Amino acid sequence: MKDVIRGRCRCGRLKLSVPGRPMLTMACHCTGCQSMTASAFSLSALFRAEDVSIDLGETQIGGLHGAQRHHFCAHCLTWAFTRPEGMDGFVNVRTPILEGVADMAPFIETYTSERLPWLRIPAARSFERFPAPSDFPRLLAEYAAQNA
């Protein structure tokens, strides 16, 4: 049986769980993430969509209400996860809501072209925008090897 990672929003009315470890961890520096987090970047962990279970509560769509489906706690509006456009089989869970966040440093950073100039994080791989779909098999394999 795989370990289960649990997560919760700030108010505790939304709880979720995922089995095992993430497939990849990320930091995004785009100005959209900066606005949605009121911070310098957002953090997320990639999981298979079928592995993400909402155990309590409901979400509502927030952000731009577009193709990127950003899910927030329906009560306190904590950003919980994103269902990325064109990647329906995956969910980016916002790492800070998960237990064990100290063990989930970002492996990749995206949108470094919009990164605040004074910010540096210890990501192993950096991308000016978002990695090409063809990059993901290699990145997933590198992350899995590093976290075996």
Image (cartoon, rainbow, N blue to C red):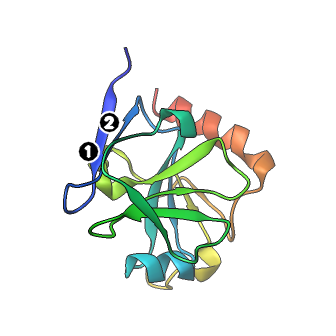
Res 43 seen here: yes
Dot 1 or dot 2, earlier in sequence: 2
Is 143 placed above or below 14 here? above
Per the image, label 1 sits on a secondary structure element best described as loop
Q: Disc 1 designates what residue?
A: 99
Residue appearing at x 27%, y 58% in the figure: 9
Q: Are marks 1 and 2 in contact (CB under 8 Å)?
A: yes
- The kind of residue tagged 1 is Glu
Residue in the foreground of this view, choosing between 66 and 34? 66
Residue appearing at x 29%, y 40% in the figure: 6
Q: In the displayed orientation, state which residue is furthest to the right.
A: 134
Per the image, label 2 sits on a secondary structure element best described as strand
On-image quarter of the N terminus: top left
Q: Position of residue 83 (x, y in %)?
A: 58, 54
Total count of labels: 2
Residue appearing at x 41%, y 28% in the figure: 20
Residue in the foreground of this view, choosing between 3 and 121? 3
Is 33 placed above or below 81 here? below
Distance between the alpha carbons at the discs numbered 1 and 2: 6 Å
- The kind of residue tagged 2 is Ile
Residue appearing at x 70%, y 39% in the figure: 138
For label 2, the crowd category at 10 Å Cα-Cα, with few meaning under 14, some 14 to 19 and many 20 or more, is some
- Residue 118, by quadrant, is bottom left
- Residue 144, by quadrant, is top right
Q: Disc 2 designates what residue?
A: 5
Q: In the displayed orientation, state which residue is furthest to the left.
A: 11
Q: Position of residue 70 (x, y in %)?
A: 51, 64
